[in-house]
Amino acid sequence: MRKDRGTVEPAEIKAFLGEGTEFKGVLSFQGTVRVDGHVEGEVVGDDLLIVGEPGFLKAEVEVGTVVNSGRIVGNIRAKKRVELLAASVVSGNITTPSLIISEGAVFNGTCLMVEPEVGAGPESEGERAGGAR
């Protein structure tokens, strides 16, 4: 069973690209966006990107959080988290502080785990180096 932490109420979704829609170019957004169609190009935003099971992105993705049930071909940079649900396929590199891969998800690429942007700094580095003795 999946916890409800990634669940989003439909009223919270600011934009929805439904199944059968196609978009080429730079998709820039604020708030939550759900894609069940095809997007080619770039996806940029600070908030949540949901890729539904019929969704397909051939794009460079730079967002706050990604919850993927569809297919993404391209690199993903997420400031907070990337969650790959059971039906998802990702072909590309992922850079994020938190990666969740559900059983059944397919990930072909590399992952670079980075510290979250908030609170990361030289003092954190010194504390880690000094604490490992």
Image (cartoon, rainbow, N blue to C red):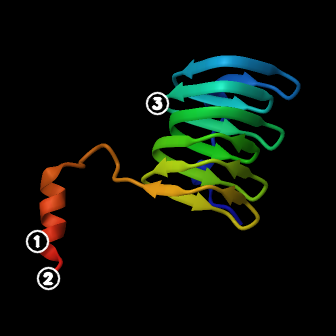
Residue at left offset 50%, top offset 41%? 77
Estimate how packed mark 3 is, as few (under 14), some (14 to 19) or many (20 or more) residues with alpha carbons within 10 Å. some
Q: Which residue is mark 1?
A: 130
Please tell me the numbered disc located at residue 35: none
Q: Secondary structure at mark 2?
A: loop
Q: Which residue is mark 3?
A: 46
Labels in figure, total: 3
- Structural distance between the alpha carbons of marks 1 and 2: 7 Å
Q: Secondary structure at mark 1?
A: helix
Quadrant where the image shows the C terminus: bottom left
Residue 47 falls left or right of residue 13: left
- Residue 60: name its quadrant: top right
- Residue 10: name its quadrant: top right
Q: Is residue 109 above or below residue 118?
A: below
User: Mark 3 is on which residue type?
Assistant: Asp
Please identify the residue farthest to the bottom as the structure is shown.
Answer: 133
Asked whether the residues under the numbered discs 3 and 2 touch, taking CB atoms below 8 Å apart as contact, a structural biologist would say: no
Q: Nearer the viewer, residue 63 or 32?
A: 63
Q: Nearer the viewer, residue 107 or 49?
A: 107
Measured as percent of width and height from the top left, residue 70 is found at: 76, 44
Measured as percent of width and height from the top left, residue 23 is found at: 75, 19
- Structural distance between the alpha carbons of marks 3 and 2: 38 Å
- Structural distance between the alpha carbons of marks 3 and 1: 33 Å
Tell me which label, 3 or 1, sits earlier in the chain.
Answer: 3
Estimate how packed mark 2 is, as few (under 14), some (14 to 19) or many (20 or more) residues with alpha carbons within 10 Å. few
Q: Which residue is mark 2?
A: 133
- Residue 24: name its quadrant: top right
User: Mark 1 is on which residue type?
Assistant: Gly
Which one is closest to the eye, mark 3 or mark 2? 2
Asked whether the residues under the numbered discs 1 and 2 touch, taking CB atoms below 8 Å apart as contact, a structural biologist would say: yes
Residue 113 falls left or right of residue 57: left
